[in-house]
Image (cartoon, rainbow, N blue to C red):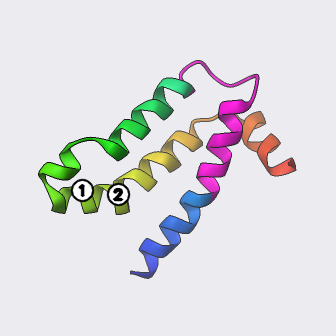
Amino acid sequence: MLRLFRLWRLSAGDLRLLWFALRHPGRPAWLLPAALLLIFCAVDPLNLALPVFGIVDELVILPLLLHLLVRFLPAEIRAGATLR
């Protein structure tokens, strides 16, 4: 359970970095479609059809996908977010 809380604490920083990257003028072209796909995964109707999968999805898979998305950002965008 402690690992799950650490994962969510990490994802809060990742969300801030993603928000900064989406507003950055030098963002990669793939970032906006990938962020939209992540949002779709968060609100897809599969969560309503299979509630157990929806819980696992929102607690584990979404933060991992968010962290993976942030890891693929260019280094200058990640460094710029820490300077702000």
Say few, some or many: other residues with alpha carbon within 10 Å of mark 2 (under 14 / 14 to 19 / 20 or more): some
Say few, some or many: other residues with alpha carbon within 10 Å of mark 1 (under 14 / 14 to 19 / 20 or more): many
For the residue labelled by badge 2, is the local secondary structure a helix, a strand or a loop? helix
The Cα–Cα distance between marks 1 and 2, rounded to whole angstroms, is 6 Å
Find out whether the residues at labels 1 and 2 contact each other: C-beta distance under 8 Å.
Answer: yes
Q: Position of residue 68 (x, y in %)?
A: 49, 45
Task: Give me the disc on residue 58.
Answer: 2
| Image point (63%, 22%), residue name | 28
Among the 4 quarters of the image, the one containing residue 40:
top left
The amino acid at mark 1 is Gly
| Image point (72%, 42%), residue name | 78
Among the 4 quarters of the image, the one containing residue 27:
top right
| Image point (65%, 32%), residue name | 22
Q: Which residue is mark 1?
A: 54
Front-lying residue, 31 or 74: 31
Task: Give me the disc on residue 10.
Answer: none
| The residue stretch that appears in magenta | 13-31
| Quadrant into which the N terminus falls | bottom left
Q: Position of residue 2 (x, y in %)?
A: 45, 81
